[in-house]
Image: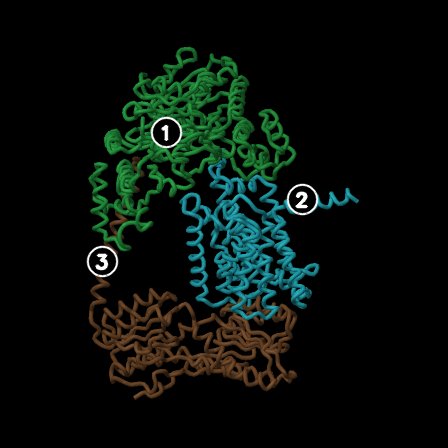
Chain colours: A brown, B green, C cyan
Amino acid sequence: MSPMGKALSKTITYVIIAIVVIAVAGGLAYWYYSSQRPSGIKVGLFISNLGNPYFALLRDGAQAAVTELKNKGVNIEMVVYDAKDDPSLQSNQIETAVGQRFSALVVNPTDIQAIQPSLSKAKSAGIPVVTTDRDVADKTLRFVFIGTDNVKGAEQAANALIQALTASGKPTPWNVVILNGIPGTTAAIDRNKGFHNVLDPLVSQGKVVIVAEEVANFRRDEALSKMESILAAKKVDAVIAANDEMALGAIQAIKGAGLTPGKDIIVVGYDAIPDAIAAVKAGEMYATIAQSPFLQGYWGVLAAYYRVTQNWNPPADWIPTPTVVVTKTNADTFQQEVSTPKPLPGAP
Amino acid sequence: MSTPPAVKAVNLTKTFPGVVALNNIDFDVMYGEVHAVVGQNGAGKSTLVKVLNGIHPPDRGEIYVDGRQVRIRSPADAKRHGITLVHQEIMVYPNLTVAENIFVSRMSRGRTPGFVVSRRELDDYASKYLKMVGLDVDPSTKLRDLGVGEQQLVQIARALAEDAKVICLDEPTSALTPGEVERLFSVIRDLKSRWRAVVYITHYIDEVFRIADRVTVLRDGVKVATKRVSETSASEVVSLMLGRSLSEFYAYKPAAETAGHPLLVVKNLSTQPTRPSEVPLRNISFELMRGEVLGVLGLLGSGKTELAKSLIGMQRVVSGEVWVEGRRVEIRSPLDAARLGIFYLPENRRLEGIVPLMSVKDNILLPSIDLVARFVRKRVLEEAIAGDWVRRLNIKTPSLYTKVSNLSGGNQQKVVIAKALARRSRILIFDEPTMGIDIGAKVEIRRIIARLSEEGHSIILATSDVDEALTLSDKILVLYKGEVKGYLRRGEVSRDKVVKLMSGYGG
Amino acid sequence: MGLKGTSLSALVRKFLSLEESKPLVALVVLYLASAVISPYFLTVYNQKILLLQASPLVMLALGESMIIMMGSIDLSPGSTMALAGLIAALASNVYGFPVILSALIGVGVGALIGLVNGLAVTKAKIPSFVATLASMVAARGLVLLVTGGTSIYGLAGYEWLTDETAGLANMVWLFIAFTALTYFTLKKTTLGLKVYAIGGNEEAVRYSGLNADNVKIAVFTIAGSLYAIAGLMMNARLQAAYPWTGYGSELDAIAASVLGGIQLTGGVGSPVGSFIGAYILTLISNILILLGVNPYLQWVVKGFILGVAALTLTRGLRYVK
């Protein structure tokens, strides 16, 4: 071997030794740190996907509650876990937290079924669990669920649509297109139910005709193609979509057909994502529905705190968080509206 | 002989597209007898046992078991009549245990009592048969953890467990160590004493004389002779096997240029196998002049294919030198070889030589395409070049755009030759160029090789056909198990001497 | 009369001997059937959206078919188009590069993913199915990491692709040009010969003294660039870089290739076939919506049509190398 090569291999050896030493030392330090029992209240917040701004708001709300409690002199700390939409990762995170003797868990489940075994471990360890945004199938595994009433939100959306149609002065019957989300998901089922709760009576009165009801899987590109094809065959007055991505895809298709969204065809979405708010401000989308992830996080931490300190029992096992219809008039202000701490219903 | 033969075949004929693999073969084997079948590659030995075992149903002919005519159309038929085949690659389950391998066919037919078989029971049962073949292994071992020789013994144990009356062994020793061979032979002798009939296929002549009672020689799908081993000799069997025909069809001309500097020099070349089936080469040296034909003669496992591939960078060379036109060269890939004018014409045309679904023209031009056109292809020029080679080599094809898969074996081989020539190669390495093609095409290919050398091409002819090598070559390199057994000028050697060298005797 | 008859039948026979004839017949039959069952099908608007919807898929199918012809498979088209479209959108709308330059950067990203695929398959000797599965997952992960799952909205500057020239959107002209270019490359260049030869018998190519690895790397890279152009097309169509763009499209690209008569064993097929295959897929989705078929039933019908088509058009579904 050349001297150069020897020197190189020596360096590599040192680097490897250094990495091993650092890894072992770090591991030991982490183990020591994590085995320390919390002196105060330790809450774990398990988020399905922090990359999604919606859940980032949930985290912000939880953080606000922790800060508020700390200011009151409560010894509380919170650890945030991101499961990146991976149920097995989330299960591992929850199981680890159970082993570390957390006081309470606030869980935003990645899946309504898959994380249940890890929650049963929390239950048998006597650690109270709050679910937020999405519930788990076995309701005995948590003491309360804090989340949006999607049926109600969808009813608000449909009512907003009818309001806009009435105001537009379009002749009845109005031709309405419904775009549905991924079949089988709770959000898709509940929102579809809410739409029909409002629209079906009008259909029987002859005021509304549902000219097409398609599945676009919550996706913008699919909604674009489907809406394009619908427009080839049908005259459409309004579109109601189970999320904003699909509503935005529909808007793109309407523009492509040479029509004006908001004028020729009224579009209503759901979720109030930033793109949709921009479209509402531009007049292309009439309305969207804002949920309150901030409140979900905020209330989630408070509920956990009351449960741990005062064995609090919630008024119901589901505390619905408010939904807000966002139109041009409140497009700039709704964010504060849903991000302002509100008192937890039934709090002691 | 009052008892009828265990198995008797009459007028067996089996053809594959383009080849008559078995031509009116009569064959029989008695109980308590080992009947060896010998022949070169492609002589039809394996086809014969595959027909007897129902793997290839025969086109014509009758098979009798215990004197009664039977129909064998599938391996299951064969098994029902007590005929079984022990083969390295067929019907082994490496991920099952030894015991499960022994009983797998019975279990699937549900002949063992009860549906659920306990592992213990199975293992006890299996060890009885393992003892019969002298194999001392735990029956719950996974088969893949055993050596090749032990796996073979497990197969024989399975044959015994299935109560097989006729056991066919196809090249059983090709992957065994000498110790394992001894053990196999003692098991075969034991099978004889248990009154089983054994069909033993091999290309090692010495084994015939150690284990067999009778020997049948096949050549080109035809039975040449059946002899009692006690009444024949090794050299008689070998010369029956290799035949003595065809030499009259072409006249030898000495190489035009045997003086001067050699075109290719190989010094002390040694290689390491890259696959288990390959043979390591040890200290191979030779020289090749312009216009000369060097015959590299050897049987299967002699290393002749490995030598050919080492010259195009497809073997791992561990030591030795290669010189082309007085310059030392390193050949790491077929591309390096092609740039030096060296082209390999593979033994296995279908796997390595042609692209079956591509046209004759595209196949011919494949190696030289970058010389003919830079990026955009030139149809007219390509047609001219390919057409020229089709005419000069007399390739029989309906058009330049016919798919090569539609041509006969001989014409496919000519397409491979055309590939090499269109690349302007100076050194052509033929590996078994006439194997598996009909006699007429054989003669034609050999004539082409002779003509190419006359035109100044240097040729390395790797073959197991003694007559092919003797009639075409200026020099002969005889290989046996990766080593040079003889490096002889034409006329220095008799046919018998060469045959002996090939089988590992003398040297 | 008789002469005319024979020349006509000769013409028909010549047509049927073309590689593309069966998919073309299938497309024509579907076209006629659709025109009969839906009065909206043949409207100018519907034909225009058909072409628009087919554009990205055609680009994916062209790249995929080249790789399938080499006897490999590529699972990365959908993710590659998303990542390339996203990077182009970031370059133009966030970092303020000119749109042309941003588009080139996007295509470069696609080519880079293709290059990595090619190197993994040849140098690291990873089977193409596994290597491209890895890049499919990794590229999608990158997209989600960068965007956090939300779209880059209000994308401007890509309208050139949806603008019309001579009655058709520029992206339609673009995919027609690329189909022709791919056809030319495969049928009329030395690279094309090597692609077919590798698909037909890779060992023979190596023994012929050709560098099969370089060919594979080149083709994977070209395919990656084609996917990237599909990503730009989706940018223009959505006026947004949408993170779930092309999710699952790799299967559509493979299905389009199969429908186009390209055998999964490699060595056989025409890019025009994969173009037709992509068009057939788009057409089926379109006609089912025009007819207002129940959305769940649509999947069943689509699967059924795919199965029947694959059965009649190709025998290639049996093996994948």
Where residue C281 sits: x, y (%)? 57, 59
- Name above or below for residue C111 compared with residue B440: below
- Residue at 50%, 53% in the rendered image: C110
> Between tags 2 and 3, which lies in front?
2
Where residue B104 sits: x, y (%)? 31, 47
B166 relative to A31 in the view: left or right? right
Dot 2 crowding, Cα within 10 Å, few <14, some 14–19, many 20+: few
Q: Badge 3 is on which residue?
A: A25
Quadrant in the picture for residue A70: bottom left
Specify the label residue C285 is tagged with: none
Where residue B43 sits: x, y (%)? 42, 27
Between the C-alphas of marks 3 and 1, the distance is 77 Å
Q: Badge 1 is on which residue?
A: B28
> Between tags 1 and 2, which lies in front?
1
Dot 3 crowding, Cα within 10 Å, few <14, some 14–19, many 20+: few
Q: Badge 2 is on which residue?
A: C14
Q: Which quadrant holds the C terminus of chain B?
A: top left
Identify the element where label 2 is drawn: helix
Quadrant in the picture for residue C137: bottom left
Q: From the viewer's side, name the closer residue of C140 and C4.
A: C4
